[in-house]
Image (cartoon, rainbow, N blue to C red):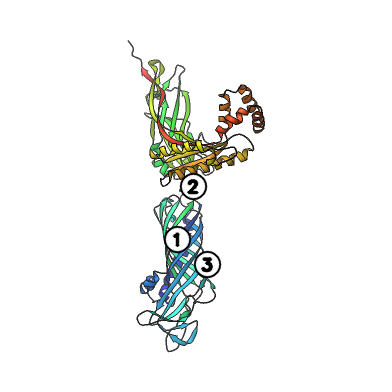
């Protein structure tokens, strides 16, 4: 017991000694990598190891386990917890759980429930059960010296305070063959509440930006000697009872889910070659007015641009002996609150065009148009230049790219149009589920929706696994109700598609878009209604469009019969790669005769 106690105290002293250093470590260099702060939930479970009087063999921490491992393997515990990471090093979590403890002790004088009149030997404990809860401070040791939220392995000690609410198990006399005989004490009738001090160490394995797998060993000091209903006697001669407390430890495997919005700008910088650039014209041309005008066209792929990231692209004309810096282009992620030149959707990416025009200079005759991308996490400020980024925040530098060749004078060249064929990913509508007015039940439009099911089966058989749903409502009634109705139709289509897919793995994204005014106006404009132009004008100029639609339906029943039912729908899209022809201008040198 004393060795175990000394070791556990040493662990706690080490952790407490680390605390002040961890505070200093968070200062770091001036522009260190920004810390991710987030909530998380976790679950863990594993072995409970008894270090009480009916288990302790005065050896190391694992000596108790080795002496009674046959029954120890029946002892288990499990926890659920919630926590918050305050920054690079320090975190806190609250855990609650349930567990079992058992054990035995040979060749040791023991007393039952403090009764020193009778000396007992060779006793066994059958399953003390406990409910526990504790509040812990955690310290990421590796991040003290080099912060990296994507590090694969981390070492995280923790210390806390908590409580244990337990019912001590049955105590029996063991015979020479280590088998149970008659019970000396039944389980206690009432539970007892006492305090605990958990101290431990966790090895964390980062599986993904939002998931950690961890191994945790925690040693729990308690304020009670009643976990096993017995106490040790120092010797037979003086019958002196040692005032030791029962301890227990836990060796658990767990999984943690983090509610963070990871923004890995270092990865974006490493993979910056995924971004493609075109310049029109290429090479650059000085026109008859002495100006050099061109477009920089940036194509950013889907699922690349982090939602909290900012990219500053600095174009410049590089020539022998110097460079001419051009106005930077700022791209911002979809959750950045500040404004840039372009906002990039994470899932879809996009194509963005920036126009430049400047007077021709002689240095431009033999130059190249280059670009330097720089990435940083949005911290409340958009920095317009890369000098300001370097000065004010942590950044990651992407690969320098050549955008276009240098400037040629217009009078020596003629303009020609060339056509490039590129692959472009587009969402193509494949099938549609329809719904009755103010309803979201698939079965209501059985015939049409059976056709949609058949089309879905064909796509599944062709190996399609990724789908997107766009659900709509017709523009009648209250706007908020229609938005909720479209969301319900999205969910109904999602459930129907998964039902059809059965055991096949498919990925479905989607949402409701509310009232589909654009399609309504288009359908009316393309219909054979006699007064369709008057209907469109009346709706477009109305201050209460929903009421106007209702009035028009009373006058023109064809709207309710033929137009509005087409809007009550959930469309299913599939991404397809199509060939697209893109025109660009080039300059060809004129041969002089």
Residue furthest to the front in view is 447
Q: Residue at the location (55% across, 40% down)?
A: 444
Position of the C terminus by quadrant: top left
Q: Position of residue 280 (x, y in %)?
A: 42, 25
Q: Residue at the location (45% across, 43% down)?
A: 500
Circle nearer the viewer, 2 or 1: 1
Circle nearer the viewer, 1 or 3: 1
Which residue matches tag 1?
A: 44
Q: Is residue 159 above or below residue 516?
A: below
Give the distance between the C-alpha atoms of the residues marked 1 and 3, in whole angstroms: 17 Å
Q: Residue at the location (65% across, 28% down)?
A: 552
Q: Earlier along the polypeptide chain: callout 2 or callout 1? A: 1
Which residue matches tag 2?
A: 261
Q: Earlier along the polypeptide chain: callout 1 or callout 3? A: 1
Give the distance between the C-alpha atoms of the residues marked 2 and 1, in whole angstroms: 24 Å
Residue 380, quarter of picture: top right
Q: Identify which residue, 274 or 314, lies in the foreground.
A: 274
Label 1 sits on a secondary structure element that is: strand
Q: Identify which residue, 366 or 476, lies in the foreground.
A: 476
Q: Position of residue 560 (x, y in %)?
A: 61, 31
**Image disc number at residue 486:** none
Please rate how many residues cluster around mark 2, counting C-alpha atoms within 10 Å: few if below 14, some from 14 to 19, many from 20.
some
Give the distance between the C-alpha atoms of the residues marked 2 and 3, in whole angstroms: 31 Å
Which residue matches tag 3?
A: 162
Please rate how many residues cluster around mark 3, counting C-alpha atoms within 10 Å: few if below 14, some from 14 to 19, many from 20.
many
Q: Is residue 467 above or below residue 43?
A: above
Label 2 sits on a secondary structure element that is: loop
Q: Position of residue 237 (x, y in %)?
A: 43, 89
Q: Is residue 243 left or right of residue 63?
A: right
Label 1–label 3 contact, CB within 8 A = no
Q: Position of residue 347 (x, y in %)?
A: 46, 39
- Residue 396: tell me if it is visible: yes
């Amino acid at each position: 017991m004393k060795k175990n106690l000394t070791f556990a105290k040493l662990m706690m002293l080490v952790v407490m000694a680390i605390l002040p250093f961890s505070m200093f470590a968070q200062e770091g260099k001036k522009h260190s990598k920004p810390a991710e702060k987030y909530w998380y939930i976790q679950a863990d479970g594993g072995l409970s190891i008894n270090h009480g009087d009916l288990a302790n063999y005065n050896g190391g921490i694992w000596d108790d386990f080795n002496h009674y491992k046959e029954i120890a393997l029946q002892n288990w515990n499990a926890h659920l917890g919630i926590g918050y990471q305050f920054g690079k090093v320090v975190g806190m979590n609250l855990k609650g759980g349930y567990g079992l403890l058992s054990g035995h002790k040979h060749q040791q004088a023991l007393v039952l429930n403090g009764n020193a009149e009778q000396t007992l030997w060779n006793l066994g404990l059958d399953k003390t059960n406990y409910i526990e809860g504790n509040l812990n401070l955690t310290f990421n040791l590796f991040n003290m010296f080099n912060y990296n939220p994507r590090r694969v392995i981390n070492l995280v000690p923790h210390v806390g305070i908590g409580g244990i609410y337990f019912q001590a198990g049955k105590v029996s006399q063991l015979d020479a063959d280590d088998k149970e005989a008659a019970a000396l004490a039944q389980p206690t009738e009432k539970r007892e509440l006492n305090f605990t001090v958990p101290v431990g160490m966790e090895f964390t394995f980062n599986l993904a930006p939002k998931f950690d797998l961890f191994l945790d060993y925690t040693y729990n000091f308690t304020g009670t000697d009643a976990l096993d209903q017995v106490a040790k006697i120092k010797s037979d001669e003086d019958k002196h009872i040692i005032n030791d407390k029962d301890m227990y430890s836990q060796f658990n495997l767990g999984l943690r889910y983090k509610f963070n919005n990871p923004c890995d700008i270092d990865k974006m910088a490493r993979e910056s070659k995924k971004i493609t650039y075109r310049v029109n014209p290429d090479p650059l041309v000085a026109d008859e007015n002495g100006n050099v005008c061109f477009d920089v066209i940036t194509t950013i792929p889907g699922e690349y641009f982090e939602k909290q990231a900012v990219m500053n692209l600095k174009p410049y004309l590089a020539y022998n002996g110097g460079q001419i810096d051009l106005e930077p282009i700022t791209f911002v992620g979809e959750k950045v609150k500040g404004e840039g030149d372009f906002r990039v959707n994470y899932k879809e990416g996009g194509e963005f065009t920036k126009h430049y025009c400047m007077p021709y200079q002689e240095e431009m005759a033999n130059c190249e148009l280059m670009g330097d991308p720089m990435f940083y996490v949005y911290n409340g400020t958009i920095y317009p230049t890369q000098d300001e980024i370097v000065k004010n925040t942590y950044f990651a530098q992407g690969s320098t790219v050549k955008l276009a060749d240098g400037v040629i004078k217009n009078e020596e060249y003629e303009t020609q149009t060339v056509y490039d064929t590129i692959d472009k990913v587009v969402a193509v509508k494949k099938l549609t589920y329809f719904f009755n007015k103010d309803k979201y039940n698939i079965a209501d439009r059985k015939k049409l929706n059976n056709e949609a099911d058949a089309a879905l089966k064909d796509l599944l058989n062709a190996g399609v696994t990724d789908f997107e749903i766009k659900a709509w409502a017709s523009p009648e009634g209250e706007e908020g109700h229609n938005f909720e109705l479209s969301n319900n139709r999205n969910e109904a289509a999602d459930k129907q598609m998964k039902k059809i897919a059965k055991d096949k793995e498919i990925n479905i994204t989607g949402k409701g878009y509310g009232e589909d005014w654009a399609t309504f106006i288009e359908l009316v404009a393309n219909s054979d209604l006699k007064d369709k132009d008057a209907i469109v004008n009346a709706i477009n100029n109305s201050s209460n469009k929903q009421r106007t639609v209702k009035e028009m339906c009373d006058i023109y029943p064809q709207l309710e019969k033929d137009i509005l039912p087409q809007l009550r729908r959930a469309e299913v899209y599939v991404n397809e790669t199509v060939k697209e022809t893109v025109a660009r201008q080039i300059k060809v040198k004129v041969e002089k005769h």
